Amino acid sequence: VFVNSLPEEDDLASGSFVYVGSDDTTAGQDQAEYVYNKLGKPDKINLLMMKGKKDADSTSTRTNAARNYLTDKGCDVNIVFSDFANDDQETAHTMMQSFATTGQTFDAAICNDDAMALGVVQYMQENGMSTSNIPVCGIDGTSDALTSIKSGGMSYTELQQTDKVAQACIDAISAIKSGGTINDIKGATDDGRYIWIPYEKVTADNLSKFQK
């Protein structure tokens, strides 16, 4: 059973090699959907993007999914900044300092994970920029991200349901060991090679559901 690090499709086989995780394409699309609606479905958007590790599949998948969602809506997407901040808050913060020297503005920031989103928010707050008018989105649903949303910093994150991922892994291993199939496990695909556990969307409106 593979978990979270998505292998090549040819490496998976029904009943023997299974992937359990959350769909990064959906995560990127959800971020873009939030931004698109938050900004009033604009015809054009100046977008800042903070990408994760260069060699990670999730980086390109999340980034492309977000951009493609907006263009599919007919939105003219102007990427004012896009670079690999390696899932690191300090790196994202430093990149924001560099971006500021260009004199450009941005309407929203979509980041491949929460740490980078927090770096963007940190810079914005240090420099008097409105985080209520400029949405900053992350992925992971970390405790720091939830705290930031509560205080009006970040606007949005996607929380991976790790408990359900873990349970799906246990169920898949049990099914494979007994010679059965994963078809009865919630989230399993018809080809028996994937079990998708959906992300949960987190905003200020439903934050209390996730923050203990």
Image (tube, rainbow, N blue to C red):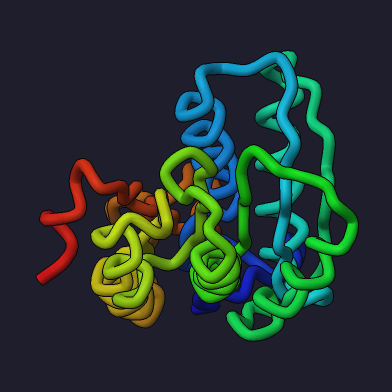
Residue in view at x 75 percent, y 36 percent: 46
Between residues 207 and 153, which one lies in front from this camera angle? 153
Q: Is residue 186 above or below residue 34?
A: below
Q: Is residue 106 visible?
A: yes
For this view, does 148 lie left or right of residue 111?
Answer: left
Residue in view at x 62 percent, y 62 percent: 112
Count the marks: how many? Answer: 0
Q: Position of residue 1 (x, y in %)?
A: 49, 78
Q: Is residue 191 above or below residue 165?
A: above
For the C terminus, the image quarter is: bottom left
Between residues 185 and 112, which one lies in front from this camera angle? 112
Q: Position of residue 78 (x, y in %)?
A: 83, 35
Q: Residue furthest right?
A: 102
Q: Position of residue 117 (x, y in %)?
A: 55, 65
Q: Is residue 175 visible?
A: no
Residue in view at x 38 percent, y 61 percent: 181
Q: Residue furthest front?
A: 128
Q: Quadrant of residue 36?
A: top right
Between residues 55 and 109, which one lies in front from this camera angle? 109
Q: Position of residue 148 (x, y in %)?
A: 34, 66
For this view, does 139 lie left or right of residue 55?
Answer: left
Q: Is residue 114 above or below residue 206?
A: below
Residue in view at x 36 percent, y 61 percent: 159
Q: Is residue 64 above or below residue 18?
A: above
